[in-house]
Amino acid sequence: MRVQSAAVIREKLYRDPVHDLIALDKESREDATLMALIDTPEMQRLRRIRQLGLAFMAFQGAEHSRFAHALGVLHIATRILTQLGKHQRISSRVAFATRCAAVLHDIGHGPYSHVFETFLGIHHESWTQRIICSPRTGVNRVLRTYHPALPREVAAILAGQCRPLFLSQIIASQLDADRLDYLLRDSIQTGVKYGIYDLDRLIYLLRVDPAGENIVVASGGVLPVEKYLQARYHMYEQVYFHKTVRAAEMMFRLLLKRFADLTRRRVATAGAPDDPLVRLIRDPAGVSLTDYLDTDDSTIQHALTRWRRGDDPVLADLSGRLLDRQLFKTLDVSRVKGVTTRLRQAREIIAGAGLDPQYYIALDTSSSVPYRPYDPKQPEIRNHILVETPGQRKPYRDIHDLSPVVQGLARATAGRRRVVFPESHGGLDLRAAIERVFLA
């Protein structure tokens, strides 16, 4: 009984809806460092950033954070390292650096996930590098306390500039800890079943090639990989590209556009000059690290509440619609010809209803290919999944060459083209009018 109590005390346990218990050893210097990283302000900020941005507008359970995902990626990366270590010698130092990279891989994400970043033209990967390498951050101090070179080593793994290459592939590849976690996590949190696949079997099948550089899949791994790629395809079709999710995201983009226009014109209603959000909108490339880290989902939520009561009618209306989930409607025009001309006509309808078409109608295009076959022009191994083929002329073959299912997925681009607009305004049925333009 005493032994059991001591074992419990020496472990820090994180309860997780996907992986059950994620345990770190308090008496291990490496695990203690990981716990210190998790407790830094930069990591704790990820609790205030939703993993799926505005997807909660369509799936009420999608309230999970990038913090939970980061711990899940750490857990899976640790399992992958253990598995690969059975077939390839991996030093404890590089294994630890990879685990640090796993937990920190999303540290640079902005609020509301990718929508905010796309609008501003910034990349969370570059901010992740800045946070890890800046001596002013808690993350950097924790890494340097372990070893002065560790921040550089972690940054190199995340940038794909390390040796051996498979360390980076654990974090970013076609079969990485990031995707392995978010597919399962997003599926569970949204309440759909499309993202389920056999995680344990996939990890068990991972190997390192004889050169000690790249991750490959053991022979017999075609079926589990097929299921994983199918899960990815269906999650994009049914969750990430869901029409309500995309409508909310487009409304948020249009609202940011209005806010940016007002900010650049120095309109007072947009916000005070010392507001981090104002500074970020005015100069995304030149904003300070402090201002960036001060911006999270709660920043946006507060701004929406303030703008709703503000003087600008467009900003107030769009903010109120998002807060109250009075979302724009969508019309699928993926197979419609002459969309540019028809969109011009639709914009005239919106203007005729007394709304500014700059902010009240847009064309949303979404696209994702579940798997791209091997291309000699893009030979980078992390873009492909190679499977062992013992006894054949080639020791490895691309999964695309071995699986008719994957061949079908490579042709089945997940994506839509939709027009996004208000259903009605001032008693006018805008939906019916716009449907006549596009579907006539």
Image (cartoon, grey):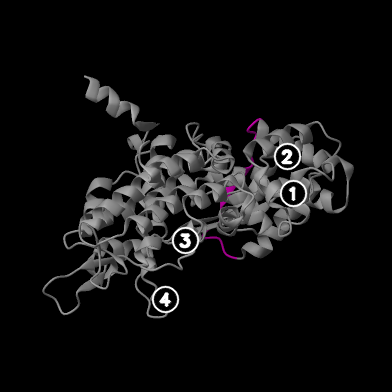
How far apart in space, not on screen, are marks 4 and 2 (Cα)? 42 Å
Q: Residues within 10 Å of mark 2 (few under 14, many from 20)?
A: many
Q: Amino acid at mark 3?
A: Glu
Query: Of residues 243 and 56, which is closer to you in this image?
Result: 56
Q: Specify which label sits upstream in the sequence, 4 or 1.
A: 1
The residues tagged by marks 2 and 3 sit, at their Cα atoms, a distance apart of 44 Å
Closer to the chain start, of discs 4 and 2, is 2
- Disc marking residue 66: none
| Disc 3 element | helix
Q: Position of residue 201 (x, y in %)?
A: 22, 49
Residue linked to disc 2: 318
Measured in 3D between alpha carbons, the distance from the residue under mark 4 to the one under mark 3, in whole angstroms, is: 26 Å
Task: Point out residue 100 in the picture as x, y percentages from the top left corner.
Answer: 44, 51
In the rendered structure, which disc, 2 or 3, sits on the residue that comes first in sequence?
3
Q: Are marks 4 and 1 in contact (CB under 8 Å)?
A: no
Q: Quadrant of the N terminus?
A: top left
Q: Is residue 329 magenta?
A: yes
Q: Residue 153 bears which disc, if any?
A: 3
SS assignment for the magenta stretch, majority: loop
Question: Which residue has dot 4 on it?
Answer: 378
